[in-house]
Image (tube, rainbow, N blue to C red):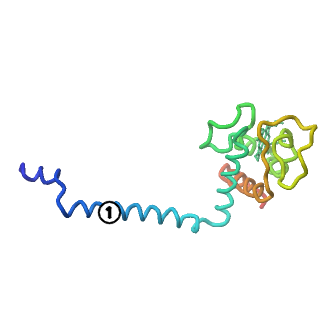
Protein backbone atom coordinates (compact mmCIF):
# COMPACT_ATOMS: atom_id res chain seq x y z
CA UNK A 1 0.00 0.00 0.00
CA UNK A 2 1.72 3.22 -1.15
CA UNK A 3 -0.11 5.52 1.26
CA UNK A 4 1.13 3.54 4.20
CA UNK A 5 4.74 3.94 3.19
CA UNK A 6 4.42 7.73 2.97
CA UNK A 7 2.93 8.02 6.42
CA UNK A 8 6.04 6.52 7.92
CA UNK A 9 8.24 9.17 6.42
CA UNK A 10 6.11 12.11 7.38
CA UNK A 11 6.09 12.53 11.10
CA UNK A 12 2.57 13.24 12.26
CA UNK A 13 1.73 15.96 14.75
CA UNK A 14 1.59 13.47 17.60
CA UNK A 15 4.69 11.47 16.90
CA UNK A 16 7.22 14.32 17.12
CA UNK A 17 6.42 15.39 20.69
CA UNK A 18 6.17 11.72 21.52
CA UNK A 19 9.68 11.15 20.28
CA UNK A 20 10.94 14.23 22.08
CA UNK A 21 9.43 13.04 25.32
CA UNK A 22 10.96 9.62 24.81
CA UNK A 23 14.32 11.24 24.10
CA UNK A 24 14.08 13.53 27.10
CA UNK A 25 13.17 10.59 29.28
CA UNK A 26 16.09 8.60 27.94
CA UNK A 27 18.52 11.43 28.70
CA UNK A 28 17.01 11.86 32.14
CA UNK A 29 17.27 8.13 32.83
CA UNK A 30 20.89 8.08 31.71
CA UNK A 31 21.77 11.06 33.88
CA UNK A 32 20.00 9.54 36.84
CA UNK A 33 21.86 6.27 36.36
CA UNK A 34 25.15 8.17 36.19
CA UNK A 35 24.49 10.16 39.32
CA UNK A 36 23.23 7.17 41.28
CA UNK A 37 26.11 4.91 40.37
CA UNK A 38 28.74 6.31 42.77
CA UNK A 39 26.28 6.06 45.64
CA UNK A 40 25.72 2.37 44.88
CA UNK A 41 29.43 1.50 44.71
CA UNK A 42 30.77 0.09 47.97
CA UNK A 43 33.47 2.08 49.79
CA UNK A 44 36.00 -0.56 48.72
CA UNK A 45 34.99 -0.24 45.08
CA UNK A 46 35.17 3.52 45.32
CA UNK A 47 38.68 3.28 46.81
CA UNK A 48 39.77 0.85 44.09
CA UNK A 49 38.37 3.14 41.43
CA UNK A 50 40.24 6.09 42.93
CA UNK A 51 43.37 3.95 43.03
CA UNK A 52 42.92 3.13 39.37
CA UNK A 53 42.52 6.80 38.46
CA UNK A 54 45.56 7.76 40.56
CA UNK A 55 47.64 4.95 39.08
CA UNK A 56 46.64 6.09 35.62
CA UNK A 57 47.60 9.63 36.49
CA UNK A 58 50.85 8.99 38.35
CA UNK A 59 52.20 5.53 37.54
CA UNK A 60 51.10 4.96 33.93
CA UNK A 61 53.76 7.36 32.74
CA UNK A 62 56.15 4.46 33.25
CA UNK A 63 54.13 1.34 34.12
CA UNK A 64 51.33 -0.37 32.24
CA UNK A 65 48.84 -0.30 35.09
CA UNK A 66 45.94 -2.24 33.55
CA UNK A 67 45.21 -4.53 30.67
CA UNK A 68 42.84 -1.93 29.29
CA UNK A 69 45.58 0.66 29.28
CA UNK A 70 48.18 -1.38 27.49
CA UNK A 71 49.55 1.36 25.31
CA UNK A 72 50.72 3.59 28.13
CA UNK A 73 53.95 3.11 30.06
CA UNK A 74 57.51 2.46 28.99
CA UNK A 75 58.50 -0.91 27.62
CA UNK A 76 61.51 -1.11 29.93
CA UNK A 77 59.34 -0.72 33.03
CA UNK A 78 57.50 -3.78 34.38
CA UNK A 79 53.69 -3.63 34.21
CA UNK A 80 51.66 -3.91 37.42
CA UNK A 81 50.31 -7.23 36.15
CA UNK A 82 53.77 -8.69 35.49
CA UNK A 83 54.95 -7.63 38.93
CA UNK A 84 51.92 -9.14 40.68
CA UNK A 85 52.21 -12.34 38.68
CA UNK A 86 55.93 -12.93 38.83
CA UNK A 87 57.27 -11.33 41.98
CA UNK A 88 56.63 -13.55 45.00
CA UNK A 89 56.88 -10.54 47.30
CA UNK A 90 54.78 -8.23 45.11
CA UNK A 91 52.71 -7.13 48.07
CA UNK A 92 55.74 -6.06 50.05
CA UNK A 93 57.19 -4.28 47.03
CA UNK A 94 54.01 -2.34 46.42
CA UNK A 95 53.77 -1.47 50.11
CA UNK A 96 57.25 0.03 49.92
CA UNK A 97 57.42 1.28 46.33
CA UNK A 98 57.93 4.88 47.49
CA UNK A 99 61.33 3.93 48.91
CA UNK A 100 62.35 1.68 46.02
CA UNK A 101 64.31 2.95 43.07
CA UNK A 102 63.67 4.75 40.84
CA UNK A 103 60.68 6.19 42.71
CA UNK A 104 62.40 8.42 45.27
CA UNK A 105 63.58 10.56 42.35
CA UNK A 106 60.08 10.85 40.89
CA UNK A 107 57.48 10.41 43.61
CA UNK A 108 57.31 12.10 47.00
CA UNK A 109 54.90 12.04 49.91
CA UNK A 110 52.94 15.23 50.42
CA UNK A 111 54.34 17.11 53.41
CA UNK A 112 57.87 15.81 52.99
CA UNK A 113 60.62 18.39 53.03
CA UNK A 114 61.89 20.00 49.83
CA UNK A 115 63.28 17.76 47.15
CA UNK A 116 66.86 16.72 47.99
CA UNK A 117 69.42 18.07 45.53
CA UNK A 118 71.26 14.79 45.17
CA UNK A 119 68.34 13.04 43.45
CA UNK A 120 68.51 12.58 39.69
CA UNK A 121 66.37 14.87 37.56
CA UNK A 122 62.76 14.01 36.83
CA UNK A 123 60.45 15.37 34.17
CA UNK A 124 57.57 15.89 36.52
CA UNK A 125 57.57 15.03 40.17
CA UNK A 126 54.53 13.28 41.59
CA UNK A 127 53.34 14.23 45.07
CA UNK A 128 51.15 11.62 46.76
CA UNK A 129 49.20 11.70 50.01
CA UNK A 130 48.89 8.65 52.26
CA UNK A 131 45.25 8.40 51.13
CA UNK A 132 46.41 8.33 47.51
CA UNK A 133 48.81 5.49 48.28
CA UNK A 134 46.08 3.56 50.12
CA UNK A 135 43.81 3.89 47.08
CA UNK A 136 46.56 2.76 44.68
CA UNK A 137 47.27 -0.27 46.87
CA UNK A 138 43.54 -1.09 46.99
CA UNK A 139 43.52 -1.03 43.19
CA UNK A 140 46.60 -3.28 43.07
CA UNK A 141 45.02 -5.72 45.56
CA UNK A 142 41.87 -5.89 43.46
CA UNK A 143 43.98 -6.55 40.37
CA UNK A 144 45.87 -9.26 42.27
CA UNK A 145 42.60 -10.96 43.27
CA UNK A 146 41.54 -10.94 39.63
CA UNK A 147 44.87 -12.65 38.84
CA UNK A 148 44.16 -15.30 41.46
CA UNK A 149 46.47 -13.93 44.17
CA UNK A 150 45.45 -13.52 47.77
CA UNK A 151 46.42 -10.17 49.31
CA UNK A 152 46.88 -10.43 53.07
CA UNK A 153 44.15 -7.94 54.06
C1 LIG B 1 59.45 7.67 36.32
C2 LIG B 1 58.96 6.35 36.05
C3 LIG B 1 58.14 5.65 37.12
C4 LIG B 1 57.01 6.11 37.76
C5 LIG B 1 56.31 7.45 37.58
C6 LIG B 1 56.59 5.02 38.62
N1 LIG B 1 57.45 3.95 38.52
FE1 LIG B 1 57.35 2.21 39.54
N2 LIG B 1 59.08 1.56 38.67
C7 LIG B 1 59.77 2.22 37.66
C8 LIG B 1 60.86 1.39 37.18
C9 LIG B 1 61.83 1.76 36.07
C10 LIG B 1 60.82 0.20 37.95
C11 LIG B 1 61.76 -1.00 37.85
C12 LIG B 1 62.88 -0.82 38.79
C13 LIG B 1 63.82 -2.01 38.73
O1 LIG B 1 63.60 -2.89 37.91
O2 LIG B 1 64.72 -2.02 39.54
C14 LIG B 1 59.70 0.35 38.87
C15 LIG B 1 59.35 -0.61 39.81
C16 LIG B 1 58.21 -0.56 40.60
C17 LIG B 1 57.85 -1.55 41.60
C18 LIG B 1 58.72 -2.74 41.99
C19 LIG B 1 59.80 -2.21 42.90
C20 LIG B 1 60.85 -3.24 43.24
O3 LIG B 1 61.84 -2.84 43.88
O4 LIG B 1 60.71 -4.39 42.88
C21 LIG B 1 56.66 -1.16 42.15
C22 LIG B 1 55.89 -1.88 43.23
C23 LIG B 1 56.27 0.08 41.50
N3 LIG B 1 57.24 0.41 40.56
C24 LIG B 1 55.10 0.80 41.77
C25 LIG B 1 54.83 2.07 41.26
C26 LIG B 1 53.64 2.84 41.60
C27 LIG B 1 52.51 2.36 42.51
C28 LIG B 1 53.73 4.03 40.93
C29 LIG B 1 52.75 5.20 40.92
C30 LIG B 1 52.50 5.85 42.17
C31 LIG B 1 54.99 4.02 40.18
N4 LIG B 1 55.62 2.81 40.41
C32 LIG B 1 55.45 5.08 39.41
C33 LIG B 1 59.46 3.49 37.17
C34 LIG B 1 58.41 4.30 37.60
Mark 1 residue crowding within 10 angstroms, few (<14) / some (14–19) / many (20+): few
The picture places residue 24, in percent across and down from the top left corner, at: 36, 63
* Above or below: residue 41 compared with residue 100: below
* Ligand 1 image position (quadrant): top right
Q: Is residue 140 found left or right of 39 in the rendered image?
A: right
Q: Is residue 68 found left or right of 136 in the rendered image?
A: left
Label 1 SS: helix
Give the image quarter of residue 29: bottom left
* Residue positioned most to the top: 76
Residue pictured at 73% horizontal, 38% vertical:
62
The picture places residue 20, in percent across and down from the top left corner, at: 30, 61
Q: Determine if the C-beta at disc 1 is less than 8 A from ligand 1.
A: no
The picture places residue 113, in percent across and down from the top left corner, at: 91, 51
What residue is disc 1 on?
22
* Above or below: residue 30 compared with residue 65: below
Give the image quarter of residue 37: bottom right
Q: How many marks?
A: 1
The picture places residue 32, in percent across and down from the top left corner, at: 47, 66
* Above or below: residue 37 compared with residue 106: below
Q: Nearer the viewer, residue 63 or 117?
A: 117
Give the image quarter of residue 42: bottom right
Q: Is residue 142 found left or right of 109 in the rendered image?
A: left
Q: Quadrant of the C terminus?
A: bottom right
* Above or below: residue 39 compared with residue 92: below
Residue pictured at 77% horizontal, 54% vertical:
133
Amino acid sequence: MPGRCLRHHQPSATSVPGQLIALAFGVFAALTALSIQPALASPTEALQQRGFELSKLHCARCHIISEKDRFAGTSSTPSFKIMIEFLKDWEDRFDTFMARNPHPAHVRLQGDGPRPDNLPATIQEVILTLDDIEAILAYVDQMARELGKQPSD
